[in-house]
Image (cartoon, rainbow, N blue to C red):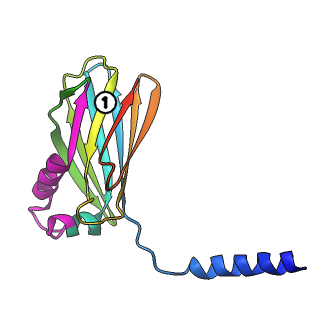
Amino acid sequence: MKKFLFSILIFASMLMMSFAAAEFYSSMTKVDYVEGSKTLKFTTKMNTAHISDAIKINPNTAGFEAEVKKYVNNNFDIYVDGSVCTLTFTGSQVNGESVWVYFEANGIANFSTIRIKNTILLATFPKQFNLVNIAYKGNQKTMNFQRGKEVNEVSF
């Protein structure tokens, strides 16, 4: 009987805690290798309010896309087999609570390692968590980034 009451107490506590307001800060980036064009294509999804806070501009203004481009270029670096790659911003799209950012790295032949430095929103939100999924020739790797772990590397 004591175990049952203890279980009920734990369940009730967890239920009450689930209603507490908790901010969740994250971004997700999908990286696809397009072999035909030798291109790494990046799609990053961020919370609209969070990126707006970081770049200090309203997402409904004309300069928002230019500031997002500058922000991504300053907070996302990629190295393929030890060589830095230039990222080309290809666009962005605000869709309600999410901002989708598109960029790519061209001229990428076969490779064995990718190292990424991802500091997106880490300066603005200490609990920010960034996830990067990379698809390369049928293989998928996942990287996690947060304060104190801004650089990650995977091998294929």
Give 32 or 127, whichever is nearer the viewer.
Answer: 127
The reply to whether the magenta stretch includes residue 67 is yes
Q: Residue at x 34, y 66 (%)?
A: 97
Stretch in magenta? 54-80
Q: What residue does disc 1 label?
A: 114
Residue 81, by quadrant, is: top left
On screen, residue 79 versus residue 128, left or right, reads left
- Disc 1 marks a residue whose amino acid type is Ile
Residue 31, by quadrant, is: top left
Q: Could you tell me which secondary element the residue under label 1 belongs to?
A: strand
Q: In which quadrant will I find the N terminus?
A: bottom right
Q: How crowded is mark 1: few (under 14 residues within 10 Å), some or many (20 or more)?
A: some
Q: In the rendering, at what x and y percent does residue 66 appear? A: 10, 55
Give 126 or 68, whichever is nearer the viewer.
Answer: 126
Q: In the rendering, at what x and y percent does residue 79 appear? A: 23, 31
On screen, residue 156 versus residue 71, left or right, reads right
Give 120 or 29, whichever is nearer the viewer.
Answer: 120
On screen, residue 131 versus residue 101, left or right, reads right
Residue 25, by quadrant, is: bottom left
Give 136 or 65, whichever is nearer the viewer.
Answer: 136
Q: Which residue is drawn at 29% across and 19% down?
A: 36
